[in-house]
Image: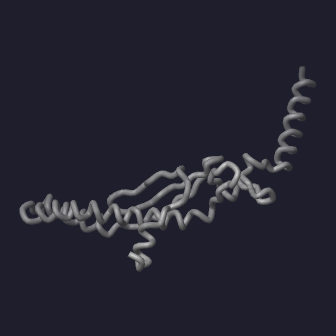
């Protein structure tokens, strides 16, 4: 089929991002945490409510109180909720990625997704694991030398 709607194209698009995330989603809504491959710092996406979760919860409550017709409706709604919830979950995940992705960048050398704030070396265009910040490294070496000098004097 040559003509696809934008919605169909979006559904078929691959989601490119990090493997380091936690899914905090519940029946009530969706939220995700994404972490830097290098330092572990991360960002949490905004909570996105689930419409099907609210309807399903209301029917479950009614079924618990009244049973009968509401019980059957709750079972049917539960099955529909499951499919709809999965679709909402996928859409929410894509939206969460779009929300937090500006805080991360992928190193072209090692392929890791790292946080721009701490682990990215702008001058070198690579993560700090592949291209360490020379000023930080020099400072670390100076500090270590000062510690070793102090320890030597103490002996």
In percent of width and height, residue 128 lies at: 74, 49
At horizontal 65% and vertical 47% (from top left) the residue drawn is: 38
Query: Is 40 rendered above or below residue 84?
Result: above
At horizontal 65% and vertical 53% (from top left) the residue drawn is: 114
Q: Is residue 128 left or right of residue 73?
A: right
In percent of width and height, residue 103 lies at: 63, 62
At horizontal 48% and vertical 62% (from top left) the residue drawn is: 14
What is the tally of numbered marks visible in this picture?
0
Can you name the residue that lies furthest to the left here?
68
Can you name the residue that lies furthest to the top here?
155
Q: Is residue 28 left or right of residue 17?
A: left
**The C terminus lies in which quarter of the figure?**
top right
**The N terminus lies in which quarter of the figure?**
bottom left
Asked where in the image residue 92 lies, by quadrant, the reply is bottom left
Q: Is residue 152 left or right of residue 70?
A: right
At horizontal 55% and vertical 54% (from top left) the residue drawn is: 18
Observer-nearest residue: 15 or 20?
A: 15
In percent of width and height, residue 25 lies at: 40, 57
Q: Is residue 98 left or right of residue 80?
A: right
């Amino acid at each position: 089929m040559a003509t696809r709607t934008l919605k169909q194209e979006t559904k078929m698009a691959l989601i490119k991002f990090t493997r380091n995330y936690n899914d905090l989603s519940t029946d009530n809504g969706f939220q995700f945490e994404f972490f830097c491959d290098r330092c572990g710092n991360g960002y949490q996406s905004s909570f996105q409510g689930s419409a099907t979760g609210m309807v399903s919860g209301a029917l479950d409550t009614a079924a618990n109180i009244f049973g009968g017709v509401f019980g059957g409706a709750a079972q049917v709604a539960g099955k529909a909720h499951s499919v709809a919830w999965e679709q909402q979950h996928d859409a929410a995940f894509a939206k969460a990625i779009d929300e937090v992705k500006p805080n991360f960048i992928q190193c072209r050398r090692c392929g890791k997704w790292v946080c721009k704030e701490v682990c990215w070396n702008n001058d070198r265009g690579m993560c700090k694991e592949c291209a360490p910040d020379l000023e930080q490294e020099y400072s670390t070496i100076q500090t270590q030398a000062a510690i070793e000098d102090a320890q030597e004097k103490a002996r």
